[in-house]
Image (cartoon, helix red, strand yellow):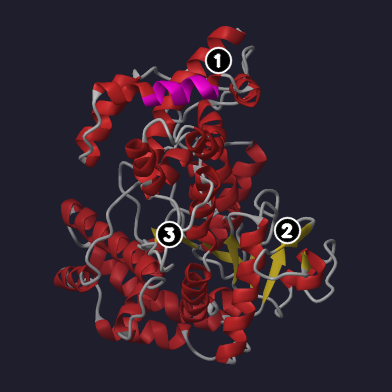
């Protein structure tokens, strides 16, 4: 994946990735307690959080306003977005929420389509059966990809459809409201990586997953993923000041370049390209006059500014046009700065040579840009796909939870986790999953079943049950550690 990104065959979908934290509290609105079956109530509460109309309405507003403010002008105003929902019922409710919000605001520049299979009944809307065709005003399932490609529709809401194999280069942004892990996370987010004329970046706004989880999913395929804390947005201005100190870039030249670049023309002419190159060459000459150390420092500042502005401009609106001009200018300047002496032994002087070089490499079948550094992609072994995970005793799980989250679980509470593991070990579905999947995929399958197993044993230890149900981070660590133990046991028994 890294190699494909470096050779510009796909885009890096993790370059502009952020999460959206939602904090909520369920309050008891009834005047009197009512008697309910505890297990059914626990399941209902777990789904209540994600299906509550206020929760969906708030996220709908965030997504639509973000799309209109930061996305719709991308790719020559052709950019599209995908909303990944948790279930078919979520997709139905999101579609209704999108339509209601758009109608309420009177927007005419964003319309949505929805994709889900079968028929859905919403318990809050009696007597109505929802289908994909019905909610899309008669557009057939087969015709949906074609319709979405037109300028009439900008957002596609999906539930277990179009998350794999869907090739739409105009997809720029993805809004994720579903737990993703392992290969599922990679396949889903990779819907954004297709190249298109005018498509320079992508953006992911994730409501449900932590960055660390997504980066872990990508690591086997993309060796250099980074998980960095977002810095102070004002750091852009500090970078701008540091760039100015080198006296390589002059503001009048930036303005001259942008006057040509942003001129209201459909396409730049040969003369326009010559003028822009002439302006950039002035800075290149000053850059070459710097010593090697200064050149390295200066180029690092340019790269940092470019990457940070690309991300932050999709999260918050900047009113400073000077930043946009500098960003545009730097993108082209960086392509013309001489390579480091330690870099590859070829020089690229312009777009024609660059394109030719890429075509040559394709025809030669060259894949590995850095011989010796790339990891091999291993196929299925004679015992399935993947290797056995390291075993972590459940007593270590109790200790880890106490240290990280301030819980006060005792050694006796370890029995609760053992009972959870033993119940899971009796599952034929999990047994088959362990024999046919990698550990990451097996862990994802267990995660989906974990809630039901937990609810079945809620009477055994209410304190742990409440903590696991109420805190996704605590639940995630518990699932991961139990999955490690189960995976090893299943595969030892099977092979």
Which residue is the site of mark 2? Answer: 116
Q: CA distance from mark 2 to mark 1?
A: 34 Å
Residue neighbourhood size for the residue with mark 1, other residues' Cα within 10 Å, grouped as few (<14), some (14–19), many (≥20):
some
Q: How many marks?
A: 3
Which residue is the site of mark 1? Answer: 490
Q: Earlier in the sequence, mark 3 or mark 2?
A: 3
- Who is closer to the viewer here, 326 or 82? 82
Q: Which residues are magenta?
A: 416-424
Q: Position of residue 69 (x, y in %)?
A: 47, 81
Cβ atoms at labels 3 and 2 below 8 Å apart: no
Quadrant location, the C terminus: top right
Q: Nearer the viewer, mark 3 or mark 2?
A: 3
Q: CA distance from mark 3 to mark 2?
A: 37 Å
Membership of 460 in magenta stretch: no
Q: Earlier in the sequence, mark 2 or mark 1?
A: 2
Q: Position of residue 381 (x, y in %)?
A: 62, 16
Q: Position of residue 185 (x, y in %)?
A: 54, 45
Q: Earlier in the sequence, mark 3 or mark 1?
A: 3
Residue at horizontal 49%, vertical 38%? 455
Q: Position of residue 125 (x, y in %)?
A: 69, 71
Main SS category, magenta section: helix
| Direction from residue 149 to residue 15 in the image, left or right | left
Residue at horizontal 64%, vertical 37%? 364
Which residue is the site of mark 3? Answer: 33
Instruction: Give SS at disc 3.
Output: loop
């Amino acid at each position: 994946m890294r190699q494909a990104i470096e050779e510009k065959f796909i885009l890096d979908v993790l370059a502009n990735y952020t999460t959206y934290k939602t904090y909520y509290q369920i309050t008891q609105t009834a005047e009197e307690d009512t008697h309910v079956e505890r297990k059914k109530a626990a399941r209902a509460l777990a789904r209540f959080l994600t299906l509550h109309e206020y929760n969906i309405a708030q996220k709908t507003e965030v997504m639509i306003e973000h799309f209109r403010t930061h996305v719709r002008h991308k790719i020559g105003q052709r950019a599209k977005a995908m909303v990944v929902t948790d279930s078919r019922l979520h997709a139905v409710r999101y579609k209704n929420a999108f339509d209601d919000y758009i109608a309420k605001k009177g927007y005419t520049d964003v319309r949505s389509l929805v994709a889900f299979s079968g028929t859905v009944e919403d318990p809050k809307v009696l007597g109505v059966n929802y289908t994909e065709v019905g909610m899309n005003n008669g557009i057939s399932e087969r015709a949906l990809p074609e319709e979405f490609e037109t300028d009439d529709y900008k957002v596609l809401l999906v539930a277990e459809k179009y998350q794999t194999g869907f090739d739409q280069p105009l997809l720029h942004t993805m809004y994720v409201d579903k737990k993703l892990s392992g290969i599922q996370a990679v396949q889903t987010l990779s819907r954004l990586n297709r190249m298109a004329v005018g498509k320079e970046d992508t953006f992911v706004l994730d409501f449900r997953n932590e960055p660390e989880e997504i980066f872990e999913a990508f690591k086997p395929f993309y060796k250099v993923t980074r998980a960095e804390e977002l810095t102070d947005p004002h750091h852009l201005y500090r970078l701008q000041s540091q760039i100015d100190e080198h006296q390589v870039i002059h503001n009048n030249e930036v303005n001259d370049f942008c006057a040509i670049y942003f001129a209201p023309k459909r396409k730049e002419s040969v003369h326009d390209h010559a003028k822009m190159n002439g302006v950039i060459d002035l800075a290149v000459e000053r850059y070459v006059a710097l010593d090697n150390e200064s050149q390295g420092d200066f180029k690092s500042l340019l790269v940092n500014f470019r990457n940070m502005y690309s991300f932050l401009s999709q999260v918050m609106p900047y009113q400073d046009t000077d930043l946009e001009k500098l960003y545009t200018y730097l993108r082209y300047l960086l392509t013309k700065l001489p390579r480091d002496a330690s870099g590859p032994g070829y020089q690229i002087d312009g777009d024609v040579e660059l394109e030719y070089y890429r075509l040559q490499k394709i025809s030669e079948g060259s894949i590995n840009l850095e011989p010796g550094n790339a990891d091999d992609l291993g196929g299925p072994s004679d015992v399935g796909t993947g290797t056995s995970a390291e075993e972590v005793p459940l007593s270590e799980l109790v200790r880890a939870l106490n240290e990280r989250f301030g819980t006060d679980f005792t050694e006796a509470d370890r029995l609760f986790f053992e009972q959870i593991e033993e119940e899971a070990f009796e599952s034929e579905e999990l047994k088959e999953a362990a024999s046919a999947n990698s550990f990451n995929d097996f862990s994802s399958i267990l995660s989906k079943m974990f809630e039901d197993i937990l609810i079945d044993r809620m009477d055994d230890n209410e304190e742990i049950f409440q903590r696991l149900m109420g805190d996704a981070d605590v639940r995630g660590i518990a699932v991961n550690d139990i999955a490690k133990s189960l995976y090893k046991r299943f595969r030892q028994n099977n092979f």
